[in-house]
Image (cartoon, helix red, strand yellow):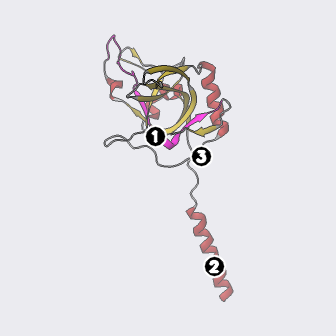
Amino acid sequence: MQTRALLIAAAIGSGVAFAQQKPKPHVTVLTVCEVMGGLNRHADTAVAVVGRMERSVSIIDHYEFLSQDRCQRPLVRHGHRFPNRIGILTDWEEGMPKPPEDQPELDDRLLAAKLSLVRRSTALGSHEEPVFGTNGQVTTVVVPNEWAVVYGRIVKLPRLDEDCGAEGCGGDDVAVALIAQSSQVYTLRSNGAWLPVEQ
């Protein structure tokens, strides 16, 4: 009788242990073009997006974007064609939608497949960044862009619904953002293998 009670207790205990182990959530992985072409479907969802990491860096500002060239379904509003770029926001402020808090596992094979799609239409390229020289003068250096994947929440920005007119929407001209934790931004090697971005 005591042995049976111990077996039942062990079975219940192991069942509790198994119940506490939550499976890693399934993550939808998209390219920048897939997000831009299906924005209404993907808005306010948590996804991983693969693209070219672009940086706009000045002495006082630093902005990051995921981009892709030659999307078949570009984002057009009021006759204005937005660039195929998604702003990356990792500094959360009150009033903004929150980034996803889970830590999903990203499938290397799926990332490699999506990166292969991006690379068919997109050159990696480079951007310029200011640096201080030894004499205190600011000079500009050319820095290669990187392939990247960011896991975050897709958000439509207000300018998406504005009529920007013939001059465009000014500034970074971005209508879509990916709100993410900085720990969910990864650089990708050309084979799809990923490493955390150095902070």
- Please tell me the numbered disc located at residue 8: 2
Query: Is 14 situated left or right of 137 in this image?
Result: right
Question: In which quarter of the view is residue 94 placed?
Answer: top left
Q: Give the range drawn in magenta.
A: 164-189
Q: What is the C-alpha distance between the residues marked 3 and 2?
A: 35 Å
Q: Which residue in the structure is indicated by mark 1?
A: 180
Query: Is 160 situated left or right of 51 in this image?
Result: left
Q: Which residue in the structure is indicated by mark 3?
A: 105
Residue in view at x 42 percent, y 29 percent: 62
Residue 182 is one of the magenta-drawn residues: yes
- Count the labels in the image: 3
Q: Is mark 2 on a helix, strand or loop?
A: helix
Q: What is the C-alpha distance between the residues marked 1 and 3?
A: 15 Å
Q: Position of residue 57 (x, y in %)?
A: 44, 25
Residue in view at x 48 percent, y 19 percent: 140
Residue with the most extreme bottom position: 1
Question: 10 Å neighbourhood of mark 1: few (<14), some, or many (≥20)?
Answer: many
Q: What residue type is labelled 2?
A: Ile
Question: 10 Å neighbourhood of mark 3: few (<14), some, or many (≥20)?
Answer: few
Q: Which of marks 1 and 3 is nearer the N terminus?
A: 3
